[in-house]
Image: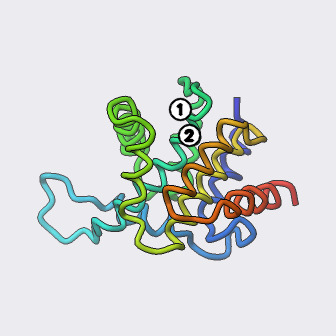
Amino acid sequence: MVSEQRIQLLARLAQSRRAEDAPASSSILSLAAASYGSKPDADSTIPTGFDPAAAALFESIVEGAYLVACADGVFDDEERRTFERVVTVACGGTVPQNHVESLVADLSDQLAEDGIDRRLARLAEPLTRAEHAREVLRIAALLAQCSNDVSAPELDMLHKLAEACHLDPSEVEGAIADVRAALNP
């Protein structure tokens, strides 16, 4: 079980641009979450600030972390609750818990239907800038640290994620090192 203190720490690191910046500047995750959280519902009649591209980026960031979390073949109810809690807290309240739960349920269904290769390709589609791809990798590496270490299947998935996002394989080790440094100052 992951403690609330660890969840808060991981969320705070996710909210910063880079692990070592916490909490100095807003991350791409935080900015994309703000747009995702303003997604209009069927009853909306006023401008909401919703940006479909930012929402797609948010979904890609969460999906990258989700795929890493599922890499070992086990994503039980406790892991799911922890994952959803970290994402919700990292969004700073801009994305309600029930929206995160719905997104994770959708990601689970899509992974079962499409398979890993298709999901990796899909999550990379909206990544128009290298910094977006790095944010997907950074957040995935951060959430891989929930259990205090990155397992071999998670590391393999991080490499697949980097490849799908057109990042150099060395970026995986860099992302993991940054997260470890921030978690163990």
Residue 161, given in percent of the width and then of the height, sits at 54, 52
Residue 96, given in percent of the width and then of the height, sits at 40, 48
The number of callouts visible is 2
**153 and 32: which is toward the camera:** 153
Whether residues under marks 2 and 1 lie with C-beta atoms below 8 angstroms apart, the answer is yes
Left or right: where 96 falls relative to 81: left
Q: Secondary structure at mark 2?
A: helix
Q: Residue beneath label 2, please? A: 83
**152 and 11: which is toward the camera:** 152
Report the residue at 37% width, 42% height from top. Answer: 103
The 10 Å Cα crowd at callout 1, few under 14, some 14 to 19, many 20 or more, is some
Q: Identify the image's colour scheme: rainbow, by chain, secondary structure or one colour.
A: rainbow
Left or right: where 132 falls relative to 45: right
Report the residue at 32% width, 31% height from top. Answer: 113
**179 and 111: which is toward the camera:** 111
Left or right: where 107 falls relative to 27: left
Q: Residue beneath label 1, please? A: 80
Residue type (three-letter) at the residue carrying disc 1: Arg
Report the residue at 48% width, 50% height from top. Answer: 62
Residue type (three-letter) at the residue carrying disc 2: Phe
In the picture, the disc for residue 108 is none
Q: Quadrant of the C terminus?
A: bottom right
What separation in Å lies between label 2 and label 1 (alpha carbons)?
A: 5 Å
Residue 178 lies in quadrant? bottom right
Q: Secondary structure at mark 1?
A: helix
Residue 155, given in percent of the width and then of the height, sits at 68, 44
Residue 89, given in percent of the width and then of the height, sits at 55, 51
Residue 180 lies in quadrant? bottom right
Residue found at the very far right of the displayed protein: 185
The 10 Å Cα crowd at callout 2, few under 14, some 14 to 19, many 20 or more, is many
Q: Quadrant of the N terminus?
A: top right
